[in-house]
Every structure is written in C-alpha cells, then in structure tokens.
Amino acid sequence: MARTGKISNAVIRRLSRYKRTLEELMNQGIERVSSGELSEKIGFTASQIRQDLNHFGGFGQQGYGYNVRELYAEIIGILGIDRTYKLVVIGCGRLGQAIANFLGAYDAGYEIVGMFDVNPALVGMESCGVKIQTASELPAFLKSNDVDIAVITVTKGAAQAVAEDLVHGGVKGIWNFAPIDIQADGIPVENMHLSDGLQTLVYYINHPV
Amino acid sequence: MARTGKISNAVIRRLSRYKRTLEELMNQGIERVSSGELSEKIGFTASQIRQDLNHFGGFGQQGYGYNVRELYAEIIGILGIDRTYKLVVIGCGRLGQAIANFLGAYDAGYEIVGMFDVNPALVGMESCGVKIQTASELPAFLKSNDVDIAVITVTKGAAQAVAEDLVHGGVKGIWNFAPIDIQADGIPVENMHLSDGLQTLVYYINHPV
C-alpha cells in the first residue's frame, strides 16, 4: 500500500474505530460504504475520514465509496493484526485474569503463552488454560520463548522494574495497566489509564452537551 | 473559572493526563512548573499546553509558570472529581470485579454501592465489600438508591438492553466495557474498547518509530 508522509498517532488510534465499524457493516452484509455513511456511523466528519484513509493510499472511488471488505482487510494489514501475537501476562490478580479472559473471548489474534505472579496463592493455578508461574521464572521463560507482547497488571510500584526485565528479555512491546507511565528502552509501550475514561464521563455528567 | 468557547472532547481527555502529571510533581514536592517543563513530562508541545489551559481561564503567569497545587485543584474541579460518585457494576465476572477493585485501590472518589450479575454462582458472593445481587433486582435498586454511574461489563449481546434499564432507572452516566458502542438516551456514555490500545501497540511493534 502507498503511504503518504508520516502517520500521526491520532490516525493510528482512529483505525481501531474504523475496523470495528467495518466489522459491523460486514456482519450486516453491507458491501459498499461512502465516507458520508461512515461519518454517520463513526461520528468523525466525512472529510476527516477521507483524509485518514488517504494516508494509506486512498481506496475509495469517487461516487462509488469504499469496498467494506477490502477496506477492512487493508486496515487489518496496516495495524498488523493479520497474524497472531504471543503474549505473557505479568500480574494475575483479577485485572490480569480479566484481560487474558477478554482477549480469549473477543480477539482471535492473541495467544497467552505465559502468566506470572509473585503471589504464592496464585502460582500453580490455571487461568485461561495457562498455569500461573512464579515471577522469578520470567527471565528464563523469555530466554526460551519468543514472546511478542507483555501485559503488565502489577502494582504501580513494581511496574517499572518489571518493564526493565521485559526489555532485557527481548519482548517487542508492553501493554501496561499499572497506573503509571512506564518507560521501556527501544520498544513501544501503551500505557492504559483506565480511570481517564471514567474522568471524561464524570466531566460530561457535570457538563451535559 | 472563566471558560472561553466550547471545550473539545480532545482537551477534556488531555486533562486526565495533566492531572496525573501534576500529582507526580506534587509527590516530588515541586511547587511551580512552566509550560515547557510540563511539555517535557507529558510530551505535548508547550504551546498546546498553554492553549489547553487557557480554555479554563489561563492560570499561568508569564515568566513564573503554573502553581502546581492550584492548577491541580482547578483541573480536579473542572473534571468534577472533587466529590464522590456512587457506582453500580453490572456484570461481576473477572473484569467487573477487577474494575471495582481497581477503583477501590487507586481512586478515592468512587464508591461502589451495588454489584449485579445474572450468574447464580456469583449472586450472594461478596466482592470489594459489596454483596453481588441478581440482575433482576437492578430496577428496584435504582429506584431506591441515587446512583451516579453504572459500569457495564456484561457480554456484547446483553449490553444495550442493560443500558436501557439504566437510563430508565435514572443513572447519570455509563462506563461501558462491553466491546460494542452502546447508545443511551440523554446521558453520557464512555465506551471503552480495551483492544484499541493493544492494536495501537501492535502497529508500533510493526512500524518502529
């Protein structure tokens, strides 16, 4: 696909939204969609949508719209979610197990290959079909397994040290749920801040549109 | 506080980020910060930061910077998180319990007052100090309790119907974790899509910066 210029983080984030909407259209048996129709469904302006999709070479045809299935396949390919990724989960409390479970239920492209916790009460337990190992086994595990992504759900205080072990162990990216912006040299980190969404909601409760 | 013009959703979303950074600065005992220093910490440009904060009347002083504690208090006030909100959790599987637990551990402003599930194996169990009730009791509960926010972690197929019950019951806002954009007449909804962050991460794994 022909890329034009640098793609901003904001555009990349919007791609997931496009993907979901296109999935919905496919489920409804819809084969073509115009930027105007996408606009109504997604809430971005039609011009924003055309601009976003032009970044990737522009697959729309004037007066004809986008082929839903092709556009979907392109976006999947651009994001790189057309293959399977191997994940480890560090921190297997409720949140770690919930995320592992969520990925198992809704996303085909992620395979949980290891789960780790420091809590002896959790070690040895099976969660989402994977036996929870003690955290001290993580470095050896990373040495003998090719892991793509680590999900961190440990406490705020422990997260940065875990991230450093993960970088050292050759993990390719970190999805962090500890409520702190962690740093990882040379690999991408996606710091999730669950409460941000809740704070936005509270704002709109107090300032009705 | 003096507001200038309509505040965009993007600015509101950035406020949580400012709040976190200011919290960090307060924890380090730092009393004043310039837009340049904030820029280094947050990653937005100094001009973006000044523009964002100007929306709320502009508390910075030329050559003097922002008073960390005052700016923090203003942002807390703008978001409306200077008071406590009453929450119910609908869906008490791992994710529902994880979110209740997360809010209990990290956020003082949210009180879980009710938890509901359809699964008889969960009903009667205590989670985060609250006894899980059967979902059919939700309408009566909402009638006799003043609930601000409902957290939805039910399945994709059940989420929209739950949202309608919540609107009918007078809930003021919905924080939705079911992987579908739900609609709720007249109240704000924050649709969380956990996988979006993971998809962004996958993009950056495949396209190193």
Image (cartoon, coloured by chain):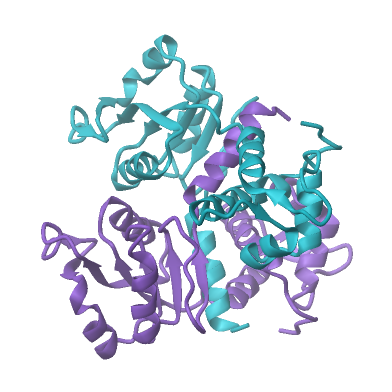
Chain colours: A cyan, B purple
Q: Residue at x 66, y 51 (%)?
A: A14
When the figure is inspected, residue A69 is found, relative to residue B125, above or below; the finding is: above
Q: Position of residue A169 (x, y in %)?
A: 49, 17
Left or right of B136, for residue A169 = right
Q: Position of residue B126 (x, y in %)?
A: 16, 62
Q: Could you say which quadrant of the image residue B130 lies in?
A: bottom left
Which sits in the foreground, A39 or B17? A39
Q: Residue at x 42, y 36 (%)?
A: A108
Which sits in the foreground, B154 or B54? B154
Tell me how many marks there are.
Answer: 0
Which image quadrant: the N terminus of chain A?
A: top right
Residue A191, visible in the rendered structure:
yes
When the figure is inspected, residue B129 is found, relative to residue A9, above or below; the finding is: below
Q: Position of residue A94 (x, y in %)?
A: 29, 47
Q: Position of residue A50 (x, y in %)?
A: 79, 54
Q: Could you say which quadrant of the image residue B87 lies in?
A: bottom left
Extreme right residue here?
B62
When the figure is inspected, residue A147 is found, relative to residue A29, above or below; the finding is: above
Q: Residue at x 40, y 9 (%)?
A: A144
Extreme top residue here?
A144
Q: Residue at x 29, y 31 (%)?
A: A118
Which sits in the foreground, A43 or B196? A43
Residue B34, visible in the rendered structure:
no
Which image quadrant: the C terminus of chain A?
A: bottom right
When the figure is inspected, residue B93 is found, relative to residue A152, above or below; the finding is: below
Which sits in the foreground, A23 or B85? A23
